[in-house]
Amino acid sequence: MRCSICVFLTALVVISCVFAAEPAEKPEAGAAASQSEASVAKPEPPADAHTKTVVDKINSLNPYQAPDLPLREDPRYAETDSELLPFRHVEPFKRHFLKQMEYTGPGRSIPEPTDVKTVRIGFLGPIYPTVSAATGGRSHEESIGRQMLHGCELAIEQANAAGGYTARKIPFELAVSNDNGLWGSSGEEIIKMAYKKGCWALLGSIDGANSHIAIRVGLKCEIPMMNSGDTDPTFIETNIPWVFRCIGDDRQQCYLLADYFYRKLNFSRVGVVRASNRYGRFGIREMRDASRRLGKPIPVEMAYSLGTTDFSLQLDRLQEAKAEAVVHWGDAADSAALLKQMRARGMNQPFFGGDRTLLKEFTDEAGDAAEGVICVSPWNPQRQDPKLDAFRKAFQEKFQEEPDTYGAHAYDGMNLLIWGIQNAGLNRAKIRDVLAYRTDPWPGVTGDISFSAALDDVGEVFLAKREKGQWNYYSRKDLGLEVKSTPVAASSSPEK
Amino acid sequence: MANRRILWAAAVACCLAWSARAAEPAAPTSPPKPENPPASSPPPKPESPPPSSPPPTPAAPDELPYVYTNWKHFTVADGLPNDHIFAVKADGNKVWVGTENGLALIDKRQGKVVRSWQEKDGLPFQAVTAIEVDKKTGDVWLGLFGGGLARYSGGRFDHFNQFNSGLVNDVVYGIAMQGDNVWAATTAGCSRYNTVTGEWKIFNEKNAPMEEIWNYGVAYDGKDKMYLAVWGSGCLEFDLKKDAEKRGDPWKVYLDPDGEMEIDLYRDDGIVHVIITGVSPVNEVLWISSYFGCCRYDGRHWRGIYAHETGLPSDFTNNVKARSENECWFAHDKGLGVFADFPTETVVTYTRDPNTLRGKAEVFRNGKVLKTVDMERAVPHSFIINIDHDGSDTWVATGKGLGWAIGDGYYAGLKKDPDWMKGAVKISDPVPSSETAPAPAPAKQ
């Protein structure tokens, strides 16, 4: 007990130091009285000097003006290594996503309403079981959806404990919608939240198809959308200026995995098994492309229908192809089943997985077979960070469970939205602006979140290895795999 | 003499441009394979990129397109239910306006809003994103953003949604009439409703080549083809004759040949991007819009259309509406862009000056400004969402109000010393070339 108190006090001291280093972002005095953890996890109060400049600028505009603030420009998209660029021997006619997208509509001139009693933020995620169009049967993402919801609930609760929406002293409120599986339902849910429930921003979702549908609706309704759970690379490759993502995507994770396979382990024949859904299809795509571009094309890629329990066909093909290693991209339970069937056949190749393999379901079902498995991770939960410790403690206390990737990223995403609202006020376009024009990384519990010009999180991703019954996390630096790349836009031939 | 000089300069420029392109190393054969050679392989042999569309026809600087200098604006102050305009449809003297919170009817003869409807007036859902008129019956079909489909007929709204009809999804982005059929582009496929037989048919990934089912727009070419603009699945052509005769595959797919989201490998090798926002077929020519640029296809040549080399206000394009094979209007986020004369690559843009709030038109040829026209008003706002042509007039839906471009004296193509230059507008020529910035260089982004 004494030890716990010491750890907690130490954490508070460290956090106090962190905040002291950023005087403009000091929490308000007394705000944390009601909850011990609220003081460490509450949203950033307004406002640092840069954000104040942004706010002053956007508040000074008439309905016909767009802010003349500097737009972020990236030398290369998604920090792609030179050798992994598509058609790298040809300078393309045009490169997309290198300059930050703008919103040029009149939305900033809509006045803040005076009659709101709560500040609603929408949540869209798979939280109740339903029939899934993707599986043709029971939906399968509720467990991660509920983690995501819990992350959001905690962020809202802490924000309210810290005074709620400070400009009006009214609480934040989460408007929760289920998006499970049925293509198109997510679109209608977003419309309800935008037009009928009066939400100021939204967080969601996980399923790639639902998320894509949602962002197109968000674009039309003009509402900021934060995504914390869809790692499909194409999600952000849509040029929608209202969409943000605060989790490293499968592109980043596949780049790391490909480097590890071919530059570290010198594999040349990596077999792939993937779910026949959007997560599997788009998750593995960058891995497949990267392998080919590095001269080690994938010899076999087997898709399976969701609900498959017998992977004999896939394993036969992997054996025929003489795969040196196996990568699986799909749900955690499928990972476990595939792995156990592999080992039962005497297939002892190294087993790799997507980020969902990190879920507890995998280790619960795989048992001892999980030892030695390596999978990608958009964050490092072992990072020494008092913010993370406090978050984990608060999450456990409130929900009696350990936060996972989805819970932690949702917590960060919701805190980003809350920060945006606190600074911009109740105007969707301005909330978008303060987030889009933010230049400093967001110090989240999942690590620093830096937005690219495409408003995507291009922060560090990791490999997790199951060692002695626990996941250990390795960065590129730990693995000796730092990206070697030259900026594309600065080095290529002149445009045609 | 001046014309000859220009012709010669243009010819030389074309030759130089062509030889520069031909000399580029390491281009794959046409069409490019969606693969990179492996890292260890030698660089590919220098080959020519796929052929560009034919070079532009030269035109003299005093040959100018029609510029709309007479505009009227409609906003809430004029009776619209909301200023955020999603759709506009002209039907004779009636102009239907779909907004984020209601529907309105403008009488052209009176030049004013004569009626409006919101949910309290029976409109089944507040946001009207698409409008079509059945010429045979006069019924007005409305695409409702989250509310399905509505038919306004005889003063009554009939409501069709995914629970009471064959509509595949209630989030409707586009509508097209084709004979007795109403086509609805929705966020989860396309539905077709026969207004005579009452039959519904759904097109989605099960019976159409839709890699994604997120339909954004639908258009009828007036003859025998329907076109779907599909976010993530390019442009789909549906042959009505083949379908009726049950002869072969009625579908034809137009995709981005490089297959990559983050680049356009070659400008003229196909559609510019797989995320398509609109398609407008006219006289055997397809005009297509996307958030990454636009393009045109004449059945033989593709032509990628980008802001940095044409003068169009932006590549982010919400919608497209062609008037002819040579004239097409684009709804950009930074202004209205009109490809006014395709053969000569002459473009007109319309914006609202955010500071003076006056209207501005600019005439470009091959990306260079020819004329700047200052006028009392042009588009109501530079964020353009939808467009409909109405004879010589054009209606423009924006993020803040509806614009009526009145086309008195309109002409297609180019004309010397046109009448619009004599109106109440201030025209300025570009600064002499020695003082100007370099010609707009293609930007890499």
Image: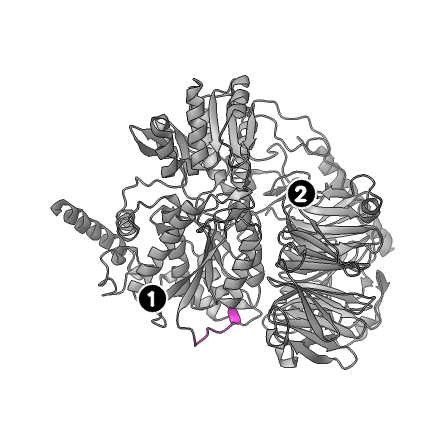
Residue type, mark 1 in image:
Gly
Q: Position of residue A105 (x, y in %)?
A: 57, 65
Q: Residues within 10 Å of mark 2 (few under 14, many from 20)?
A: few
Can residue B87 be seen at all in this image of the molecule?
yes
The verdict on a common chain for dots 2 and 1 is no
The numbered mark at residue B206 is 2
The relative height of residue B89 versus residue B190 in the rendered view (above or below) is: below
Look at mark 1 in the image and give the residue it sits on: A164
Q: Position of residue A52 (x, y in %)?
A: 39, 64
Say if mark 2 contacts mark 1, CB within 8 Å.
no
Residue type, mark 2 in image:
Lys
Q: Position of residue B371 (x, y in %)?
A: 74, 64
Q: Position of residue A223 (x, y in %)?
A: 51, 61
In the depicted view, which residue is nearer to us: B12 or B423?
A: B423
Residue at 41% x, 67% y is A119
Can residue B440 be seen at all in this image of the molecule?
no
The numbered mark at residue A417 is none
Name the image quarter holding residue B96: bottom right
Relative placement, left or right, of B224 versus A174 is right
Residue at 71% x, 47% y is B235
Q: Is residue A112 magenta?
A: yes
Instruction: Name the chief secondary structure element in magenta.
Output: loop
Q: Which residues are magenta?
A: A108-115
